[in-house]
Image (cartoon, helix red, strand yellow):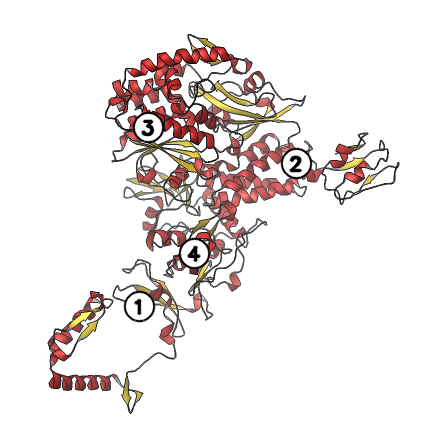
Amino acid sequence: MLVMDMLDEIKDKNRKQLEERLTQKGGYIIDEDGIKLDGDYFKKQVRIALKNCDIIDPTNIEEYIAMDGYFSLKNILNNMSQQEVIDIMKQSGLRGRGGAGFPTGRKWETALQYSSDKKYVICNADEGDPGAFMDRSILEKDPHSVLEAMAIAGFAIGSDQGFIYVRAEYPVAVKRLKAAIAQAKEYGVLGENIFGTNFNFDIELRLGAGAFVCGEGTALIESIEGKRGMPRTKIYRTAHRGLWQKPTIINNVETLANIPVIFQKGVDWFTKIGTEKSPGTKVFALVGKIETAGLVEVPMGMPLHEIIYDIGGGVPDGKSFKAVQTGGPSGGCIPENLLDTPVDFESLAKIGSIMGSGGMVVMDNTDCMVDIAKFFLDFTVDESCGKCVPCREGTKRMLELLEKITSGNGKKEDIDTMERLAVTISSASLCGLGQTAANPVVSTLRYFRDEYEAHVMDKKCPAGSCQSLLQYFITDKCIGCTKCAKVCPVHCISGKVKQLHVIDQDICIKCGACQETCPVNAITRS
Amino acid sequence: MKINIDNKSYEVANDSTILEVCKLLNIDIPTLCYDERLTPHSACRMCLVEVEGAKNLVTSCSTRVRDGMRVFTNNEKVRSARREVLDLLLSNHPMECLNCEKSGRCKLQNYAYEYDLVDGTFKGETRKGEIDSSNPFYIYDPEKCILCGLCVRVCDELQCSHAIGFEDRGFDTIVATPFREGLINSECVSCGNCVSVCPVGALVPKSLEKFRHWETKEVRTTCSYCGVGCQIDLKVKDDKVLGAQPAFDGVNQGLLCVKGKFAYKFISHPDRLKTPLIKKNGEFVEASWEEAYRLIRQKATNIKEESGADSFAGLTSARCTNEDNYLFQKLFRAVIGTNNVDHCARL
């Protein structure tokens, strides 16, 4: 059992050891402000949710304590009332980092208002956006920050039971969480009579089985209850009737990771970071055609170009920037002329994208925007739960139209049909997955309509990415070496040795093998 | 509280949904997945209405009324969303209305007519699946299914058999038994309540007779199989019973068991006894009721005189009505004069 006073002792002892170890290892800035990662990539970053990542040993609770861990919980249990905790959350203006941006304090206050014999705190760790790995990093590298925040949430709303719904595809995260929960119980910061007070709080893990839709709050609840992961229709809010019809709050991993720091450093400190409506920072998984990919945590309101160029180093291989996709399959593609848009919930929504959970995929001039829209829609069609008609049937029809367009069979009216369908899918779907499923199509139609029209009218893919619309030709440069004819998998190249070869366009499958093998660059693509 | 529906003000009860309020007010809202006995599912999206100030259209089956709410149940935005939803459903539905058993009673057909849709306009992949005809009483055709989930929910929430559920995801979703082992190998008790709620022709009774719903008339009756008193609307054509539909306004509230739902064919079976039979010279011969009662009375009197009243024993059934059982014991105690009377539920 860890009594209140021992926390300082553990901190002092381990802080010294940690600093010594990191100094030896190198790559850290250690000063009176704390411990930070050193390097150009981190200069413009402000790390709150990721503050301990790649610094502490995540398997050792004492190193988390060395970074002021569990002090917020201790202080709250010792000195604060439930309402005071909620007031601080409300004043901090912290908004849900899972994508929707709902104010966390308001969510907690609703759950506090309803009296019930049982209440639940759920951590949504079912991160599923393609290319996004913010939550995974926190769970693997700083699991105690999530546990501490959940205990704080439990105290605030009057709950003694928490669940972490984590996807089974994150085995390391699962292992670290299990170890962290066991350690936390051993140290008396979880379980019964936490810090010797009469507050009890336990956390259990529930593993997701691979369904993206289970990241949606009510589908997640159904899944924990042992049912098929399908979103519920919301007659009552989750904070009123959630898990097993009891008041329940669901917070995302990154949201939770912010909470102990807010209580440690204060509301004034937190609200100075970020914008007025979106205080704090946001972690992005910066990936795609970018020089330095990785996790970046920046203050809300930082313009997109600063993230992409100043932190990420811009587009590599001498290619030019075309668009950045934020918000995963629910988000949109943002063109170059809008790169001065600040990243916050409202600004991104205004230009037809969303903040989402933090996926940020950079695309260059070789990426076809119709194909990108198709990729995301293909993902949504696969992951739709099949419950409501607009999402189940509508997204499939939209994907079929996109396939028609990218294969060169599109008609002008197909674009109109997609636009009409997008309105229905967005306004009539049951859950967030369906309501945002059309965003990749809508945003690319808004900013890259000319690309759609090129596919439909001219049967051309301007980015040279859609295979069906490509044609390979052999030019006069051909020396008749026959290499291309030999490598062609469908034998569509004919010609005699040392004479010009010809590609039979009817048979060609546009695999590009001939172009790669030609020693004199005689084969062109159009 | 006061709410405004389609520019008219109404005083309505707290804690009702928009759909419940509209039903009371006779304001028509189309539904495919709604059933007042079940938890709202909000999957079909046909009951969408516009609520002033809401970001999206809302499902009236799951949205509670609020004081001062302004609702539009039939404006252009609502109608066009419903029409598009119907179009999507029809695009993944075989257009076999000419030969479908459900024709004339099909909600999808009726709404297609109401919203002027001849066919689905999206020509693409359609759901494929094999018909499950393993159950002796009904068949399931996944291609006609619109995945409203009424069958799954009635089986879960009311019949509590949990025999069927949704399988697969998204466009590939179908209603299936666990591991697709077929209805006959599932927990299905053949109650047929799924068949009764299916709004389309996906779940239909196996029938040897061909008939059209508009050729039949409905005759209300009380089920004679047990004492519950379930109300059934028998489907009758030319004095022949061709189907049974549970009544919602009876004690059974729209539910039946396998006997009530499917076991009506005895009514017009050629082997059915229509008169009492008396054995004469070793053979059963048809007799009138009067003749039969006279014989029973005469034999009972003789036995009582020879062997006494306690030589009789009466056994009745717990499945008979209370009234039947009362009269039966009365017959034995007061008429025959013995207390030897019991019923089958004493095991």
| Residue B223 versus residue A178 in the image, above or below | below
Amino acid identity at mark 1: Thr
Distance in Å between CA atoms under marks 2 and 4: 42 Å
Given the image, on which type of amino acid does mark 2 rest?
Glu
- Residue A142 rendering spot, x and y as whole percentages: 42, 23
Nearest the eye: A237 or A3: A3
Label 2 or label 4, whichever lies nearer to me, is 4
**Is residue A228 among what the camera can see?**
yes
On the picture, is B177 further left or further right than A340? Answer: left
* Upstream in sequence: badge 4 or badge 1: 4
Image quadrant in which you'd find residue A178: top left
Q: Which residue is mark 4?
A: B199
Circle nearer the viewer, 3 or 2:
3
Q: Tell me whether marks 3 and 2 sit on the same chain.
A: yes
Determine which of the numbered discs, if any, sits on residue A453 in the image. 2
Instruction: Look at 51% across and 48% down and name the residue there.
Output: B172
Residue A130: where, in percent of width, then height? Answer: 53, 32
The amino acid type, in three-letter code, at marker 4 is Pro
Q: Which mark is residue A108?
A: 3
Where disc 2 sits, the SS reads helix
The label on residue B221 is 1
Instruction: Evaluate if marks 3 and 1 touch, with contact meaning CB atoms under 8 Å apart.
Output: no
Q: Which type of secondary structure does the marked residue at label 3 adopt?
A: helix
Please tell me which of labels 3 and 2 falls first in the chain: 3
